[in-house]
Image (spheres, helix red, strand yellow):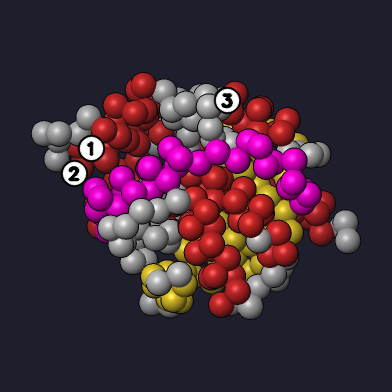
């Protein structure tokens, strides 16, 4: 399995396809399996890099403080190790935090941003709902499968869960195969709690697309509206679905992202 050493940890990554480079950054506690409905379509036209943030999947999981700045520096180290610059960066949820910081801390590496189901953090964003927080923290007495299933029940819309139960079962299975240790999840969670990019967003000068699921009860969709208003020239698109709307409505999500990347490519 390919790994690179960055900032004192081994980071697992995969490269699919060829063409202009894109980097996909997943959310809290999720690993590369998150992108199962994006990889094939994106890799048909782009060199698509996916990786596990520190703390999850096949990457190292140190029990030391994490920050979104550090996770962004990990991503930058991966891109530099692969010799990639001017990369289209797509981040979901916590991965959207990382994407924002990557653009702010390493602007030479970023060609465009896609920020999905995320926020700018800090006191002026809408916090996670109580329902979402309960699913993350009130897990005492639950089996790992029960806790993971509860999390997906919050992250996916009721309609999708009813119509595609086999996908939810597969998502649960992926998380059980390579579980995120509780201490590592907590380190990522605290990094997200401490994140606040609101005051810096005017510095982002790359084309930016913000997407959100209208039924998101993890990070309410108003966060995406605030985020889009704070980044110069950002476009906002709303789609049906919950926090994992990019899985629920993958065809529409992928189309919007690919169209955006094509428009960016026309501007030199």
Mark number, residue 42: none
Q: Is residue 267 left or right of residue 49?
A: right
Residue at (44% x, 76% y) in the render: 5
Left or right of residue 174: residue 96:
right
Residue beneath disc 3: 124
- Looking at the rendered image, the quarter that the C terminus falls into is bottom right
Query: Marks 1 and 3, how far apart in space?
Result: 30 Å
Measured as percent of width and height from the top left, residue 65 is found at 36, 53
Front residue of 34/3: it is: 3
Task: Name which of mark 3 and mark 2 comes first in the sequence.
Answer: 3
Q: Residue at image x 60%, y 51%?
A: 101
- Looking at the picture, how far across and down is residue 145, in whole percent? 20, 42
- Viewer-nearest of labels 1 and 3? 3
Location of mark 2 (residue): 144
At mark 1, the secondary structure is helix
The label shown at residue 147 is 1
Nearest to viewer (mark 3 / mark 2): 3
* Range of magenta residues: 178-207
Residue 63, compared with residue 3, is above or below; it is above
Q: Are marks 3 and 2 in contact (CB under 8 Å)?
A: no
Residue 116: horizontal and vertical position, in percent?
Answer: 58, 41
Asked whether the residues under the numbered discs 2 and 1 touch, taking CB atoms below 8 Å apart as contact, a structural biologist would say yes
Placement of the N terminus among the 4 image quadrants = bottom left
Residue 189 shown in magenta: yes
Q: Residues within 10 Å of mark 2 (few under 14, many from 20)?
A: some
Farthest top residue in view: 130
């Amino acid at each position: 399995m390919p790994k690179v050493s960055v900032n004192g940890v081994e980071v697992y990554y995969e490269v699919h396809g060829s063409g202009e480079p894109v980097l996909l950054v997943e959310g809290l506690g999720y690993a590369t399996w998150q992108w199962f409905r994006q990889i094939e379509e994106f890799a048909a036209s782009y060199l698509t890099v996916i990786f596990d943030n520190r703390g999850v999947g096949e990457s190292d999981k140190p029990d030391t403080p994490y920050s979104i700045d550090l996770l962004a520096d990990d991503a930058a180290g991966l891109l530099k190790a692969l010799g990639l610059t001017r990369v289209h960066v797509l981040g979901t949820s916590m991965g959207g935090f990382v994407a924002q910081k990557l653009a702010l801390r390493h602007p030479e590496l970023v060609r465009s941003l896609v920020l999905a189901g995320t926020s700018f953090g800090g006191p002026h964003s809408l916090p996670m709902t109580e329902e979402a927080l309960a699913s993350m923290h009130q897990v005492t007495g639950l089996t790992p499968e029960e806790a993971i299933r509860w999390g997906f029940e919050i992250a996916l819309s009721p309609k999708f869960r009813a119509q595609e139960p086999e996908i939810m079962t597969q998502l649960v299975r992926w998380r059980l195969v390579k579980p995120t240790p509780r201490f590592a999840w907590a380190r990522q969670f605290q990094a997200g709690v401490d994140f606040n990019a609101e005051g810096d967003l005017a510095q982002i000068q790359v084309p930016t697309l913000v997407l959100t699921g209208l039924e998101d009860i993890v990070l309410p969709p108003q966060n995406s509206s605030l985020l889009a208003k704070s980044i110069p020239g950002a476009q906002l698109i709303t789609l049906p679905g919950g926090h994992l709307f990019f899985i629920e409505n993958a065809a529409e999500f992928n189309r919007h992202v690919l169209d955006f990347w094509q428009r960016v490519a026309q501007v030199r």
